[in-house]
Image: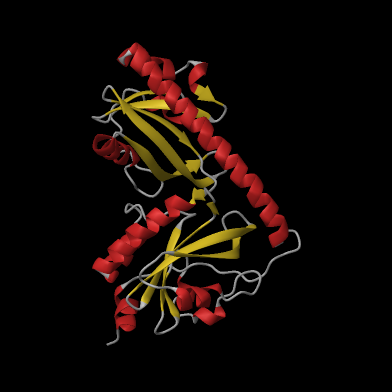
Amino acid sequence: MTKFTRKAMLVSVLALAFSTVATAENSPVQAENDTVDIVKSEESTRARVAQLLDKAVAHIQENGLSGVNDFNNDERFTDRDLYVFSLSTEGILLSSGGWSAGMVGDNVINYIDAQGVPLFQRIIDIAKAEGAGEVEYLWYSMSLGRDENKLTRFKVVDDIIVAVGYTPHVATDSEVVDLLKQAVSEYRKNPIAAMRKFRNHQSGFRNPDKYIFVLDTKSRQIIFAPSQRDLVHTSLDKVLDVQGKPFLTKIADSANAEEILNEEYWWFSSRTKSVEKRHAYYQLVDDDVVVVSAFAAEQ
């Protein structure tokens, strides 16, 4: 039994949805202009998050534990769609100026997101180990009527976790590269176990925007992908972007084990219903290419 056959039999896979038709309304030229606007908006949001979080941390440093109460209703700790919340390292939600206000006083350590991930537990684990960090999770938006990515940035001050959450539109290049490094490390240890982990909602490898797929350079086929089954075992040459470019063939032909490479392509997103300029970061592991694709902002 070949390596490829073993993978196909042992792994229950999801595949990426590839589209090859661009409409006049959603042309790459228009999409590139839209991309610039989205990236500028994202940079502005990240700056607002950092500023609000620093203000909240300074407030605790000046006022002590009782300062968390001001996060509930003081307009200084909101900025349009942004708000501050605080959490004890034991999992008690101490305050919130947003959707979680109704849970203030509750132990939320086992509270899960739309994918079953215990997001507050992840925040606490990282906070205890690093003193600061970010957690990405999937949350149901009442206004949009669907799940959307959320990102919470947090810092620990006087044993209190102070946090600001927001909806990211794009991932930075460094975030995508970090995810690829983690994926490659897992794949080198055990490809089958790695793909099971990539598929697991609670592993940190699954979200609607940054997704992992795997190509086999020997069979010249897709062997793992995150969103639909029908293209698994499809020839790389048959998968084209909206401009007709066989980008997966280029990825497979150029990949090597010594460095991370990047390929850009145009894609119709079934999630955003528009043409996007995407970045595929990839690296060779034995005969396979591990790829992370995302709509990414340059840093």
State the image coordinates of residue 263 (x, y, percent, origin top left): 53, 66
Q: Residue at x 56, y 55 (%)?
A: 271
The answer to which image quadrant residue 277 occupies is bottom right
Please indicate, yes or no, whether residue 98 appears anywhere in the rendered image.
Answer: no
- State which quarter of the image contains the N terminus: bottom left
Q: Is residue 66 left or right of residue 297?
A: left
Q: Nearer the viewer, residue 52 or 204?
A: 52
Residue depicted at x 56% and y 80%: 238
Q: How is the image coloured?
A: secondary structure
Seen as rendered, the residue at the extreme front is 258
Give the left or right position of residue 247, taking residue 104 as reference: right
Farthest right residue in view: 24
Outermost residue, bottom side: 1
Name the one closer to the observer, 209 or 142: 209
Q: Residue 30 falls in which quadrant of the image?
A: bottom right
Indicate the position of residue 213 as horizontal and vertical percent values. 43, 67
Q: Is residue 56 above or below residue 164?
A: above
Residue 190, percent across and down? 25, 69
Residue 297 in view (yes/no):
yes
- Relative to 194, is 240 on the left or the right? right
The foreground one among 174 and 191 is 174
Q: Is residue 293 above or below residue 159?
A: below
| Residue ID at (49%, 49%) | 172
Q: Residue 245 placed where, x, y %? A: 61, 74
